[in-house]
Image: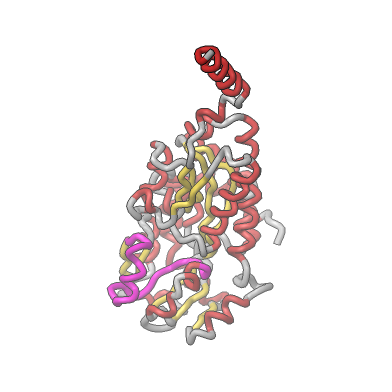
Amino acid sequence: MKLRNLLGAALCAAATLAMAPAHAQNYKSEYKLSIVVGTSFPWGQGAQIWADLVRERTEGRINIKVYPGTSLVQGDQTREFTAIRQGVIDMAVGSTINWSPQVKQLNLFSLPFLMPDYAAIDALVQGEVGQELFKVIEKAGVVPLAWGENGYRQLSNSKHAVSKPEDLKGMKLRVVGSPLYIDTFTALGANPTQMSWADAQPALASGAVDGQENPLSIYTGAKLYDVAQKYLTLWNYVSDPLVFVVNREVWQSWSEQDRKIVREAALEAGKKEIAIARKGVTPEDPSLLKEIEGHGVTVTSLSEAQHAEFVKATKPVYDKWKSRIGEDLVELAEKSIAARKK
């Protein structure tokens, strides 16, 4: 009798197992999603929105945990793309700047003064250029799903207002780990210093560096006005699109239905994240700028003539990197921007 019961229980268990989706048995209990900043920033909010949508729509089959501060690669954001490709990281919402050492074409967005307005950014990422870059990223071993946005990178410092290239002479500025940024700020007469974001904030607080460049959402979110960054220049010299990606092996381990859910959730999260990133920093809604000024910050907006001086000073850098990135891709970007709907 006891043996019969045991056999019956075993048969029931086997039947239950047979009826369960085969793919679900191979799923991880948790998928690690990497971001550079905290979840309070627009970038982090976009990652969390994606994670929540996927968990809800897959009914918990795909459980994503967000790991801020590039903690999965000990804070070294330039190693993030390699770690995703190797499977150390399952998913990410990553910066095109941080991944440009491994995918040289992503340096496109860091060409100084390529994108004059938000319509120009949209023309690139939502158009043919964005499609071409997704092919390049996929060829590099990572599955790209959607675009997000860190935003236009503005310049702040603790010394004085900056309205012309000469104002940057000798100024020690924290920049991300990209040779193009070193070239750009060297051409402007500054002393650029590569530093991770984790190291940048204490360096600004101690005065080890004079300034930095980042989107206003990062500037305000990190309260950089409290670490002597009292001079802010709005110059829109580069923008930093984000990419929602999945490790290739992880992607292939999911069912077709779940891949569709993850992709659609990424597209939705990307759109929401872009809206969050642009809130308060557009000509139509400058509310964040007013908040920054309320902290005693001197905000400098460049005139057309002043802007042209910065463009002229960085033109040799633009030309040098155009050939490195790929002249065909850069020319396609230039044409896309020229044809944009303003």
Q: Quick one: 223 or 215, which is closer to the camera? A: 223
Residue at left offset 57%, top offset 16%:
8
Q: Which residues are magenta?
A: 195-217
Residue 309's x, y, as percent?
A: 48, 72
Q: Is residue 129 magenta?
A: no
Of the pair 169 and 34, the residue shown nearer to us: 34
Closer to the camera in the image, 307 or 57: 57
Asked if residue 126 lies left or right of residue 168, the reply is right
Pick the quarter of the image with the N terminus: top right
Residue at the spot 70% in from the left edge and 62% down from the top edge: 342
Q: In front here: 295 or 23?
A: 23
- Residue 144 appears at what percent x and percent y? 54, 41
Q: What's the residue at 62%, 30% (across, down)?
A: 256
Residue 334 visible here: no
Question: What residue is at 53 percent from the left and 85 percent from the top?
Answer: 294
Q: Is residue 152 above or below residue 252?
A: below
Which color scheme is applied? secondary structure
Q: How many marks?
A: 0
Q: Indicate the position of residue 283 as horizontal and vertical percent values.
A: 65, 73
Judge from the rendering whether residue 305 lies leftward or rightward of residue 183; answer left or right. right
Say if the magenta span includes residue 199. yes
Is 206 placed above or below 197 here? Answer: below
Instruction: Looking at this view, name the residue that lies furthest to the front.
Output: 1
Image side of residue 196 versus residue 68, left or right = left
Q: Position of residue 168 (x, y in %)?
A: 37, 75
Residue located farthest toward the right when viewing the structure as drawn: 341
Residue 15 appears in the figure? yes
**159 in relation to 142, above or below:** below
